[in-house]
Amino acid sequence: MSSIVAGEIVGIYRYLLKAPQLRYLTGGSLLIKTFSDNLAPAIARTLEESVPNKVRFSAAGRFLFEFDKTENAEAFLRTVRFVTNSLLGQGSLLVCGPLDNGKGVVRKIADILEGMKASGANGSISPHHSFHYVQRCGACGSWESMKFRRMDKDESPVLLCNSCDTKLKARNHETITIDFPDGYPLKRISLEKETKDAEKDCLQVAYALSEYDEGLDRSKDFSDLTKDTKTGYIGVFYADGNTLGALISQCNTPEEYERFSNKITESTREALRSALSSAGKGAKDSVRIFIEGGDDLLVVLPAERSVAFAEKYLSGASGSGTALKNGVCAGLVFSKPSIPFTMLFHKAEELLVSAKRQVWKRCMDKNTPEGKTAIDFMLLTSPLIESIDAIRERQVYIMPDRRSYTLFTARPYLLKEFKTLTDKLSSFKKLNLPKNIFLTLRDIFYPCELIYQENIASRPEARRDSRVDENGNFVALEKFITRQASLYKANEKEIKSFFNHEPIKDNPTWSGTYEDKGEQSVRRVWQADIIDLADFL
Ligand SMILES: [Zn+2]
C-alpha cells in the first residue's frame, strides 16, 4: 500500500503582506510558486524515481504526494519541513503523514490539517527568513561568504561579503542555498537563476523572476500600471472558490482529489487566460499576478481593465461544467496606486467576504455555479477608510414599520446582475453626457458623515434622512432624474429610461425586492453603485 504525505504552508497572504516593499512581495510570491511548482516535486523525485506521476497536487503552497515506500514518505516529510522552516520560517508548514493510502484518506488529511489550524498552529512565516540562506556573493561570486548584517532604513536586509566586503541589499530572488545536517537524504538544495549539473546529493532548482516581475521588482508601487491610463487608478481583484474545503472532502481517494484539482486548475487557468485577453492588447504586461493556484487568484491591474477582467474571469471559473460547483466570489477595489498594498488587499478581502455572505444568504440553494457567483466592489478614495460594514450601515434606510429596509446600494452583486449593470452603464456613458451627472449622484447617495448624523439626530423616530420619504420613496433620486432630464433635454428619454430602469424586467435573477421569511422586505437600490464604477468602464 502506498503512503501519503500532504501539507499546506500557513499564512501565505500574511507572509506576502508583511513584505515592506513591492520587491519582497514579488520575491515572496516567487518563492511560494517555486516551492509548489518545482521544489517540492523535485525533492520527491530524488527520493523515488516513480514519483512524477504521484504528485497528486502541488500548487499555491498546498500539496499531496504519494510514495511507494513509507520510509521515502517519511524522508520527504522531514526534508520538506526542514526546507520550509529555512525558507519561510519555523512552523510555516502544516504537514501530515505518512498515511496509508485508501478510501477516505483525503478527508482524513483535511480533518488533520483543519485540526492543526484550529489549535492555533500558524508558525512564524516571514518574508525575510530566506536571506539567512543567501550564501553566494553577487559581486565576487565566492561561496559561503555572505553574512546577514542588519536591516536597512527602508527595511531591506543588508548582507555583507566576507571575501570582498561588498554590502548587498538582499532580495528574495538571490541564489538561496540550504545545507542539510547529517541524516537527511540531501546534502544541499540551491535555488538558482541558472542551473548546471548538480553534485551528488545536491538539488538545484530554477529560481528567477520573470521579465515582468523584474519590472515590478524595480518599482516602488503600482504607478507604472497606470502610466497610459486616463484615470490613474488601479484595480485589486481577489477571487476565491466557495466552500472548497467541503468540495475536497467529497473526494475519496488521492486519484479523485487529483482529478478534482486538475479540473479546478484547468478551468481557472482558462478563465485567467480569457480574462487577460479580454483586458485588451498588451494586457499581460499590465496585469500583476501575485497568487494563482487552485481556486485562488490575486491580481493588480489598471482599473479601466479590471471590470471586464473580473467579469470574464468569474464567468470562466464558474461556468457550466467547472469543478467549483458552489461558485466563485470576488472583491474588487479601485484605488490610486499610492495607497499601501496591505490596505488594498485587506479591502479586497473584506469585499470578497461580503460577496460570500451574500451568496450564503440568498442563493446557496441555487444549483448552478453561476447562480452562486458574486462580486462586491468599491472605490477607495482615502487610506483612512472605515470597514465595509460601517459604510454599508449608512446606506440602510429602515422604514417606519421597522421591518422593511431600503439599501442605497445593491452590492454585492451576483455575476449576472453585475453584467447587466455594467452593460447598461456602458451604453449610458456612450451618450457622452457631462461627468458631473455622476458627481451630483454622489452627493445624494454618499452624504458626508456629519450631515448623515444630523439627519438621524433630528428625526430619530425612523432614522429618516432627506433621501427617502416616509413611504420609502426615493425622493432625492426622483428629483435628481427630473433635474438632469430637463438640463439635458436632448437626452431626456435616455436619462429617464436609464435611471428608472428596473433591471428585474430584463433579468429575473436581479431581485430588486426580496422577502426574508415573509417578515421583512429589503429593497436594493442600484443607482448608487454606478458612481464607483462609472470611470472604469
Ligand atoms: Zn564578495
Image: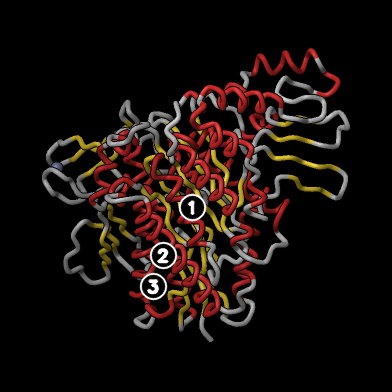
| Quadrant of picture, ligand 1 | top left
- Label 2 neighbour load within 10 Å: few <14, some 14-19, many 20+: some
Q: Nearer the viewer, mark 2 or mark 1?
A: 1
Residue 37 has which mark?
none
Instruction: Name the residue tied to disc 1.
Output: 311
Is 83 situated above or below 13? below
Q: Quadrant of residue 412?
A: top right
Mark positioned earlier in the residue sequence (1 or 3) = 3
Q: Report whether 356 appears left or right of 381.
A: right
Q: Secondary structure at mark 3?
A: helix
Q: Quadrant of the C terminus?
A: top left
How is the protein colored in the picture? Answer: secondary structure
Instruction: Name the residue tied to disc 3.
Output: 44
Q: Amino acid at mark 3?
A: Ala
- Label 1 neighbour load within 10 Å: few <14, some 14-19, many 20+: some
Mark positioned earlier in the residue sequence (2 or 3) = 3
Q: Nearer the viewer, residue 95 or 208?
A: 208
- Label 3 neighbour load within 10 Å: few <14, some 14-19, many 20+: many
Instruction: Name the residue tied to disc 2.
Output: 270
Q: CA distance from mark 2 to mark 1?
A: 14 Å
State the residue at coordinates (62%, 67%): 247
Q: Number of callouts in the render?
A: 3
Q: Amino acid at mark 1?
A: Glu
